[in-house]
Amino acid sequence: MESVQVILDIPTEKRSYDIHIGQDLLSQAELLLPYLSGKRAAIVTNTTIAPLYLDKLRHALTEQKIETFAIILPDGEQYKNWETLNLIFDALLGHRCERTTPLIALGGGVIGDLTGFAAACYLRGVPFIQIPTTLLAQVDSSVGGKTGINHPLGKNMIGAFYQPRLVLTDTTTLDTLPDRELRAGIAEIIKYGLIHDADFFAWLEQHIQQLLARDFTAMRYAIRRSCEIKAEIVSLDERESGMRALLNLGHTFGHAIENTMGYGIWLHGEAVAAGTLMAADLSQRLQFITSQDVTRIQHLFETAGLPTKGPRIAAKRYLEAMQLDKKVKDGTIRFVLLDRIGQASINSSVPAMLLLETLTTCIT
Ligand code: NAD
Ligand code: MG
């Protein structure tokens, strides 16, 4: 049993927090003890994860004399809404939870976002602990402090910045994650290499098979490096004015794919993979990167079993969908493009002709 401690110095709320990454951490509840001030904790999870991992966590906490109760929510992005949030508040009030009662999110990004937002709001803020169980949540949504829910008129539109006290990443939980969800998480990992760390990208090229096989040592390093890169970028720019937008490489195109295909048809990570290839293609047309670079990127996504071309949608519809992107300012789309493998920057003056070429070339 091994466990790595990653100290992330995120200056939100003027404190840092730890991300423990290791095997079978769910049964090591003593890791949570320093962050539990009372004798009780609420665990928020869903109907898929509860039968897999809830008992294990509750048992470990009981052994540490922490009384727990579980709030088991329906599973799915469509439940990341006010109604479900209210179910959490109902349970917290019903159990007379106090300001010291921590909320523990046991699940993927949906559970993490909902629980974090509930923790930010309940009694104007209670302690929050994340136990992410999808690869995407372990490398992305559990870092950076964004919490929130969807509104019928837009995804992630209602929310708050709220940092957890601790993130406990138990890589053993990945054993039950469907392959498709695993690969979607790998797409975001590849993104980190592309935007910030050429050596990490090269490491991923060497170790992609180990990651797909869920090899612990490789997985631990990939998760750790991803968290470090995200934390570094977030801490440079906490409220998304500049640097943080780089985390959206492939996302402008990706969101257009998700939007036009209907959410849930393409997983987010799959849309990001195809979107990243579009961003790479556009970067090459602008002569920032070479065709060999594009080939390397395409090869890595392909080996990871991720799509490298967008669905065959008319360029006009792509463009319409891209206008909805959060990075659009005064009608101008701001693209995250690659200066080289390992470095990205924002570009708001992409010639329409080149964009059109990308949108008509990088589709199936
Ligand atoms: P998810 O939470 O819906 O999980 C995907 C599926 O896997 C679900 O059905 C879930 O029940 C299941 N699952 C989770 N862990 C499992 C396990 N160990 N074994 C088997 N099944 C398991 O999806 P996600 O990809 O983890 O997260 C997506 C959400 O995260 C979106 O709502 C997105 O907006 C959000 N997000 C937030 C941030 C942020 O900064 N806060 C960043 C990225 C994404
Ligand atoms: Mg993403």
Image (cartoon, helix red, strand yellow):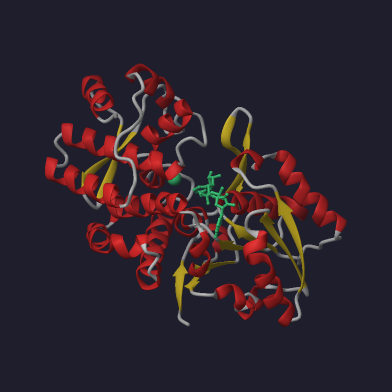
Q: Residue at x 23, y 27 (%)?
A: 361
Q: Residue at x 67, y 65 (%)?
A: 54
Name above or below for residue 139 compared with residue 355: below
The image quarter containing residue 39 is bottom right
Quarter of the image containing the C terminus? top left
Viewer can see residue 59: yes
Q: Nearer the viewer, residue 56 or 247?
A: 56
Name above or below for residue 170 compared with residue 281: below
202 relative position to 264: left or right: left
How many numbered callouts? Answer: 0
The image quarter containing residue 281 is top left
Name above or below for residue 282 compared with residue 289: above
Q: Nearer the viewer, residue 221 or 181?
A: 181
Q: Nearer the viewer, residue 190 or 156?
A: 190
Quadrant containing ligand 2: top left
| x and y, in percent, of residue 236 in the image | 40, 54
| x and y, in percent, of residue 240 in the image | 45, 44
| x and y, in percent, of residue 159 in the image | 62, 43
| x and y, in percent, of residue 279 in the image | 28, 36
Q: Nearer the viewer, residue 303 or 115?
A: 303
Viewer can see residue 290: no
Q: Residue at x 36, y 45 (%)?
A: 246
Q: Residue at x 25, y 63 (%)?
A: 203
79 relative position to 300: left or right: right
